[in-house]
C-alpha cells in the first residue's frame, strides 16, 4: 500500500466527483477533511475556494489558512482526503487542525493511518509545533489512526450530543 498526497487540480475533477459520490451512495453525507466538498455542487467552485484558502492573502475571512490533499494510490486513484488547518479559531477549537476520510471501498487497509502520517511533516514544515485532532468517542478506527501517529488524549467534550475527544500530536519530536 503506497499512497501520496496531491493537491486538488482540475485534472482530478472526474475522479473527485466519483470519490464524493461513493460516500453518498454509502449514505454518508459528510466527508470529513473535505473542506465542504460534500456540500458543494460544482467541483470548480470548490477548487477555487480551497485554492484561495491556502494563502493568507486570499483566505476566506471566515476560514483559516488550510491545505487540502487527496491521497492517491499507485494507480493514481483517489482513496482519501485530508486537510490541514494551520491555526484554530474559536469555531475550530473543538474540531482540530485536520480531518480526513477514506472512501468506503478502500477502508480497513491502513490508508487513514498513512494519510495522517504523510501530513505530519507537511504540518511541521509549515511551522506548526503540534496538531490537535477531534474524534467522536465511538469512532474506534479514527482513534486508532491518531494513536498510531503519536496522538495523546488531551481533553473530552460534547459535540452535537455525542461525546468526543481531542488528541494532540507533538511535531517537534519528529
Image: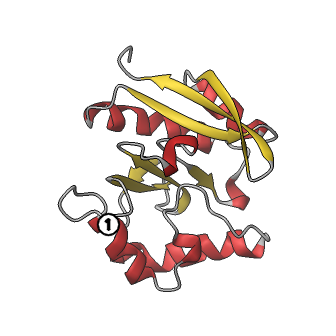
Q: Is residue 52 left or right of residue 104?
A: left
Q: Quadrant of residue 164?
A: top right
Q: Quadrant of residue 153?
A: top right
Residues 7 and 142: in front is 142
Residues 102 and 45: in front is 45
Instruction: Report the residue that reaches farthest toward the left.
Output: 57
Residue 73 in view:
no
The residue tagged 1 is 60
Label 1 secondary element: loop
How was this image coloured? Answer: secondary structure
Q: Is residue 13 left or right of residue 151?
A: left
Answer above or below: position of 8 versus 4. below
Quadrant for the N terminus, please. top right
Answer above or below: position of 72 versus 112. below
Mark 1: few/some/many CA within 10 Å (<14, 14-19, 20+): some
Q: How many marks?
A: 1
Which residue is found at the position 27% from the left and 67% from the top? 52
Q: Is residue 42 left or right of residue 105?
A: left
Amino acid at each position: 500500500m503506497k499512497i501520496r498526497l496531491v493537491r486538488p487540480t482540475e485534472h482530478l475533477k472526474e475522479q473527485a466527483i466519483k470519490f464524493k459520490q461513493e460516500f453518498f451512495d454509502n449514505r454518508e453525507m459528510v466527508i470529513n477533511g473535505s473542506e465542504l466538498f460534500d456540500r458543494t455542487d460544482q467541483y470548480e467552485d470548490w477548487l477555487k475556494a480551497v485554492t484561495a484558502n491556502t494563502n493568507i492573502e486570499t483566505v476566506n475571512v471566515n476560514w483559516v489558512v488550510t491545505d487540502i490533499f487527496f491521497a492517491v494510490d499507485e494507480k493514481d486513484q483517489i482513496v482519501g482526503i485530508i486537510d490541514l488547518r494551520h491555526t484554530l479559531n474559536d469555531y475550530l477549537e473543538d474540531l482540530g487542525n485536520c480531518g480526513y476520510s477514506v472512501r468506503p471501498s478502500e477502508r480497513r487497509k491502513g490508508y487513514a493511518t498513512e494519510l495522517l502520517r504523510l501530513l505530519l511533516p507537511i504540518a511541521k514544515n509549515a511551522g506548526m509545533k503540534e496538531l490537535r485532532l477531534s474524534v467522536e468517542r465511538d469512532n474506534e478506527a479514527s482513534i486508532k489512526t491518531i494513536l498510531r501517529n503519536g496522538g495523546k488524549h488531551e481533553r473530552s467534550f460534547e459535540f452535537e450530543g455525542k461525546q468526543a475527544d481531542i488528541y494532540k500530536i507533538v511535531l517537534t519530536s519528529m
